[in-house]
Image: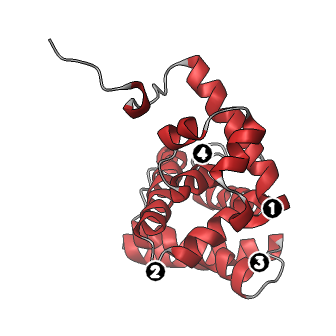
Amino acid sequence: MTSKPPVHLRQPNPDNPRVQRTRARILAVARELLPEVGLTGLTYALLAERAGVTRQTLYRHWPTRAALLCDLTLQGPDLGYPEPGPDVRAVATAWLVSLRAGITDPATRTAALAMAAHADHDPDSAQALQHIVVDRHAALNELLEPSGLTITPEQYTLLYGPLLARLFFDRAEASDDFIDATVAQWLTTVDADER
C-alpha cells in the first residue's frame, strides 16, 4: 500500500472546482496588487493575506514567483481572443491585436517585463518565459489550422517580435497600421519559407 505525501507536499488537483476557484481568486488579487505595490511589494505574505489563503497554499500552486508571474501573463483578462479561420492574414492580425490588448493590462505588462528582466540570472524566470512562448506558439497554430498553415517557432518570433519591440523598447504605440504592416511583412517571410 502506497502512502500519500503529507498535506503540505501534495499538489492541488487542477480539475477540482474548488482548486480552480482558489487559483482564480488568488490570480485576481495578484492582478490587482501588482500594479499597486510593484514586483518587490508583491510578497507571498501580502498576497496570502489579501486573498484569504495561507502562504503554504500559494507555494503549493506556485513554488516560485516566476511560476506566479507566468500564470498572470498566460491567464490575463479576457480582452478578445481571436477565432480560428482560413485567412492567415486575418488570424495573424487578430492575434497581434489580442497580444497588444493583453500587454496593455498593467499586471500582465509588469509580470512579462519582470520575467524578462530576471531571465538572465534566474533559471525559473527563463523557464517561465520559454513556457509562455511555447504555449502561445501552439495556441496560434491551433487558430491557423483551418488555413492549413503550421508556423515554425522562428516564424512565430518574427510575427510577435516587432510588436513587443515597438511597445517595450520604442515605448511607442502599436497602431492598427503598425500591426497591418507587421503582418504584411511577416507574410512575405512565411510565403518565402513555404516555397
Tell me what residue is drawn at x 57 percent, y 25 percent.
19
State which quarter of the image contains the N terminus.
top left
* First in residue order: circle 2 vs circle 1: 1
Q: What residue type is labelled 4?
A: Gly
Image x and y of residue 136, in percent: 52, 55
Tell me what residue is drawn at x 53 percent, y 38 percent.
56
Q: Is residue 171 visible?
A: yes
Q: In this view, does 162 lie above or below 109?
A: below
Image depth: mark 4 or mark 1 in front: 1
- Residue underneath mark 3: 178
What is the crowding at mark 2: few (fewer than 14 residues within 10 Å), some, or many (at least 20)?
Answer: few
Q: Which amino acid does label 3 sit on?
A: Phe
Q: Are marks 2 and 1 in contact (CB under 8 Å)?
A: no
* First in residue order: circle 4 vs circle 1: 1
Image depth: mark 1 or mark 3 in front: 1
Q: How far apart are marks 3 and 4 (CA)?
A: 22 Å
Image x and y of residue 131, in percent: 45, 57
Q: Is residue 76 visible?
A: no
